[in-house]
Structures are given as structure tokens and as C-alpha cells.
Image (tube, rainbow, N blue to C red):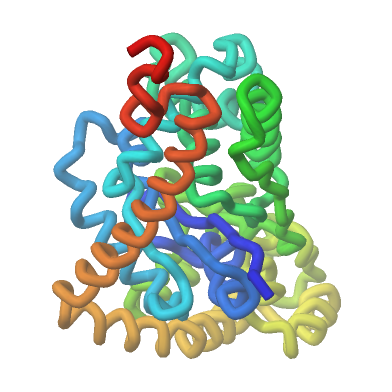
Amino acid sequence: MVRERILTGDRPTGPLHLGHYVGSVANRALLQDEYDTFVIIADAQALTTNFDRPERLREDVLSVALDNLACGIDPGRSTLFVQTMVPEIAELTILYANLVTVNQLFHNPTIKTEAAQHGFEDKMPFGFLGYPVSQAADITFCRAHLVPVGEDQLPHIEMTRKIVRKFNAMYAPALVEPRAKVSTVPRLVGLDGNTKMSKSLGNAIYLCDTADAVKDKVTKAVTDPARIHPTDKGHPEVCAVFAYHRAFNPDGVSDIEKRCKAGTIGCVPCKKLLIEILNRFLEPIRQKRSDYEKHPDRVWDILRDGSARAQQEGARTMAAVREAMKVDYFTAPASSPESA
């Protein structure tokens, strides 16, 4: 039986963190056994916010590849590839741009939110505004059936679906209309209590962080501001440290919650316990990442092979797209016998 195909991945803007792991990376490692999985390292999209620092991309691409491999992405079961090494994605982006209005892009809620984060309200680059169109090309170039996303990414997926429906109705049914596979895992908050763990906010624990770095970050993490003394009754629902216990300490979280509310465990011992749990969890990831770091050429070979396979799939899609649009100039007859 032919397996359905999934497209997932990351923008290479630095190493991946625990928020990425909880939100997508852990799930994609499991899904590769059930689906034909394509994992994109979206370097062109990383340029929408780092266009003035392109020299960082090489390091960031390698870092994201290392994190995926360390977390269980198997190049024998998944296609791990680099976006810009598949020119058909760029070609599709250009074609899709004619099927979307500027007004639709400006009203995309995800674009609005991220534009505010980057200060782009009054000076938005065209590339950033067109990010959802580029993402539609990412999804459809390999004819993905499913896209694992959080709820905040649903507007992007819906735009992709609209583009596909419009293309198929206007030309011919050459594209697969993808479905969103919505994650039910709650978003992991930042160590500062911010609702989002983010590299730009400096509130993240990275998958490649050392044991000492994890200790330092957790020690400084925000807890219940209403607790002054260790014996004060706490409110774990507002505590960033408790959120990490909930995500990484499932067997002990109920006990932590009861003791916090009763004032029988202070923030310091609660943090110490979390430090032990996180470092125990991260140690095999660190070790596997370290093994790959010793052989960077092997990682680049994995990306080269994955990109070659992705490019083959892109070529198949573009052949169907060109035929549907009647722009397959060099495969169609130059003239009919009657006109010769």
C-alpha cells in the first residue's frame, strides 16, 4: 500500500530548542515510520528575516540538520533536504504568486504577528510578505498529503489549500490539496514566562545546550511571582518551571503540583529536580549530535542525497504543472502536420 506523504521542517535561524522538540521534532521522528516523510530545511525563508546576514546560513543549516538527526530523523526513512537546492520550489512560488492577492497576504494573522515581532510593520520586505506563498510551494512540490502544524500555522495551510484549489480549477487537477495535521501538544512556554519559547527572546533551552548551560538557565527561570517563602502555597499554572515538569516529567508532575499548592516544596528544589530531568533527557541527544559533529561531511552528504531525491519529486510535479498550464514548450509538438 502506498503511504501518504508528510512535509515538515524548520527555518534555519539557529539551533533547535525544546519548544521545537515538543511541538514538532519528536512527532516527526515517530511519523517517519507511518508516512513517507519529507523534512525541509527552509533556508530561503530564513533569509526573509536574515537577508542582511546570509553568511550565517551555512552554519545554521548544518546545525538544524544535526538537531534533526540527533533526535531520530533517519535518512534511510525520511528525506532531509535543503530548500534552495530544489529549484522547482522557487519556480512554483513564482507561479503561485499570480493566484494570491496582496490583500490576502496582509490579512494573514500569522504574518501580522511575526511582522510585529521583527518590526516590519512599516518596512515589510516583499519576501517576508510572500512567505505563505513560498510555504505553499514547499508543501506542494513533493505532493504532500499532510502537514503537521500548530494551530497558529493553520492560516498558512488554508492559504495553500486555496492556491491548490484555484490552480486545479483554473488549469487542470495537477496538484495535491494538503490537509493540516494539528498538534495537540501545548506550546512550551519560555523560561521567562513568555507564551512562546524563542531564540530571539533569549528564553530557550537548546537541544545542544551543555549540562551546565541547562543548569544556569533553569536556575534563572521565572516561577510563581506570588511565592515569597518556600512554604507559601504556590500556583503552578503560572509557573514556567512547572510547565517543563508537565512536558518532561509526566510521572512526577502530579506530585509536584500537589506539593507546590500545599507549600511543601520550594522553587529551588523544584528547579534542581527539573535540571536533573532535562539533562537526563538531553544527554542521548547530545551524544548522538556529537557523533555527527565529528563527521560534518557525512551530514552534508545526507543533505545532498536528500535534496537530490526532493529535486526529482519537484521535477515530476513541475512537469504536471507545466502541462496543466500549457507551458510545456519543449515537450509539446512545435507544429501540427497540417500547418507544416
Is 178 or 219 nearer to us in this picture? 178
Task: Identify the residue shown where x is 74% and y is 89%.
Answer: 251
Q: Is residue 61 left or right of residue 113?
A: left
Task: Identify the residue shown where x is 58% and y is 62%.
Answer: 24
Please state the total of marks drawn on the protein image: 0
Image quarter (top left, top right, bottom left or bottom right) of the N terminus: bottom right
Against 302, residue 186 (above or below) is above
Against 201, residue 27 (above or below) is below
- Residue 85: image x %, image y %? 27, 48
Image quarter (top left, top right, bottom left or bottom right) of the C terminus: top left
**The quarter of the displayed image where residue 289 is located:** bottom left
**The quarter of the displayed image where residue 71 is located:** bottom left
The answer to whether residue 159 shows anywhere in this view is: no
Is 264 or 14 nearer to us in this picture? 14
- Residue 3: image x %, image y %? 64, 70
Against 32, residue 332 (above or below) is above
- Residue 166: image x %, image y %? 67, 24
Task: Identify the residue shown where x is 39% and y is 64%.
Answer: 80
- Residue 242: image x %, image y %? 68, 70
The answer to whether residue 281 shows anywhere in this view is: yes
Is 33 or 252 nearer to us in this picture? 33
Is 101 or 105 nearer to us in this picture? 101
Task: Identify the residue shown where x is 53% and y is 66%.
Answer: 37
**The quarter of the displayed image where residue 88 is located:** top left
